[in-house]
Amino acid sequence: MTYELYYWDSIQGRGEFVRLALEQAGADYIDVSRGPESKGQGVGAMFAVMESKSLPDIPLAPPFLRDGDLIISHVANILMYLGPKLGLAPEDQAERHILNGLQLTITDLVAEVHDTHHPIAVSKYYEEQRQEAKARTAEFLDNRMPKFLGYFERVLRQNPHGPAHIFGDRLTYVDLSLFQIHEGLRYAFPRATAHLDERYPHLAALRGAVMTLPNIARYLASDRRIPFNENGIFRHYPELDKEMD
Amino acid sequence: MTYELYYWDSIQGRGEFVRLALEQAGADYIDVSRGPESKGQGVGAMFAVMESKSLPDIPLAPPFLRDGDLIISHVANILMYLGPKLGLAPEDQAERHILNGLQLTITDLVAEVHDTHHPIAVSKYYEEQRQEAKARTAEFLDNRMPKFLGYFERVLRQNPHGPAHIFGDRLTYVDLSLFQIHEGLRYAFPRATAHLDERYPHLAALRGAVMTLPNIARYLASDRRIPFNENGIFRHYPELDKEMD
């Protein structure tokens, strides 16, 4: 069965956490919004689901995944569903909930990164809330980023199976998501993240390990990997970035 | 087995979504932070878990649930775990993911409600970001609240089993959470929510149905239900509220 991923066609955004899992597993999937309209794909196909007047349980926002008749929304939920099928999560129910808790902490971090450039209104441009964005970004870089990254570094360090993975002794989708967080923060805030590797060595090692996985390396070098840009979650606005002590 | 809920002792906050599920099910649980230190409870017991240097998979923030050795963090994750055990979710795996998607949309809404009074920095008081809070709240009331509530109203309306429940034909934890959202928004923004019942009739009916469930009614009348206050997620600051067209 081919998985159908529905997300915006021109950004990594929240969809990227799902793409990384599908790519690492070599799964058969379609990135629907990026496909041709002639095949019933494209962004219109995504809106058709969201705006359906008859489907039950329609999602409010992308990303969502279609697996046959089933439609699953929200990144953490999609990954929890796909995890065991893709060999990127334990089969054990209790362990799956532990992994899901870690992914939901990443969800919170991603929301805070988004709000660094949109602290007041998602319906307005960044340029209309630039002053507030400066204040919110300062708070993020001074307090929130260290809190989240320090937390993940600590979970790696306290992993009874060793710090190579965030959970257990093998690769899970949360490891892939932590790679993406690392990449995104470095793209958005090159100055503020200059000391990231030194301060969070286990996270840095995990990033290095993930980016050299053959399937991930192949994906990153392909045109399926959309470059970071200023429409996504991680945006590089030099005036928001700053040197850290 | 007694469930242990860990959350702040003096607010409804995010923990309330879990409390409502436990109360409706008549589950055996301890609200640890509100218990006596003499029994190893109190807020200190919560910090002891979060600050443990040896436990694996420690949570970054409350609420979290302890069920024997298992520690589960994040509201939606806790509810997904408890749901089938408490008879408040289907046993079917696919259906549980649909329900989880709905709960995660509530999570997003709750985060946005929080940010109406803290748009810049969680580390600072509301009074230090009041101007930005006014702008963010206006955006919330004008655009975001209608988007979320309109969405849930539509999911109720499109439920093939009828609009009495958000999913399927019986009560789930998401119904209880929607009641809490309704209560919270009415507390925080009495003027802006004056027309809520008229505009979202299915949501209003659901609220009425939930609050008259015997176990819920008993809980709401008890001193276990902490009153809304200005330390929680839903805060009533009259200067942020406004009449809606």
Image: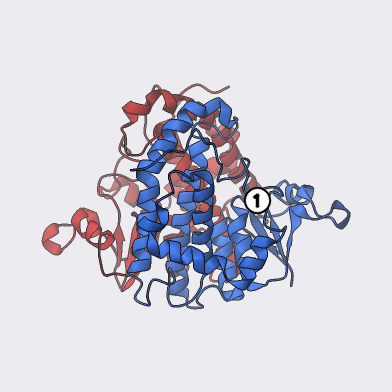
Chain colours: A blue, B red
**What residue is rendered at 38% in x and 77% in y?**
A161
Q: Picture coordinates of residue B242 (x, y %)?
A: 47, 22
Name the residue located 54 percent from the left edge and 36 percent from the top edge. A237
The quadrant the C terminus of chain B occupies is top right
Left or right of B70: which side holds A23?
right
Residue A124 in picture, x, y percent from top left: 59, 30
Dividing the picture into quadrants, the one containing residue B96 is bottom right
> From what the image shows, is residue B17 above or below residue A68?
above
Reply above or below: B196 against B14: above
Residue A101 appears in the figure: no
Q: Nearer the viewer, residue B77 or B79?
A: B77
Q: What element does badge 1 sit on?
A: loop
Q: Is residue A239 above or below residue B69?
A: above
Callout 1: residue from which chain? A
Identify the residue shown where x is 74% and y is 69%: A2
Q: Residue furthest left?
A: B38
Give the residue at x 43% y 52%: B213
Residue B21 locus on image (x, y percent) = 41, 58
Q: Is residue A90 visible?
A: yes
Q: Quadrant of residue B3?
A: bottom left
**Residue A198 or residue B71, whichever sits in front:** A198
Q: Residue tagged by mark 1?
A: A227
Q: Is residue A48 left or right of residue B30?
A: right
Name the image quarter holding the N terminus of chain B. bottom left
Going by the numbered disc 1, the residue's amino acid type is: Pro
Q: How many marks?
A: 1
Image spot of residue B54 (x, y percent): 26, 70
Which residue is more in the foreground, A207 or A21? Answer: A207
Bin the neighbour count of mark 1 within 10 Å (Cα to Cα): few under 14, some 14-19, many 20 and up. Answer: few
Q: Does A244 sit left or right of A223 as displayed? A: left
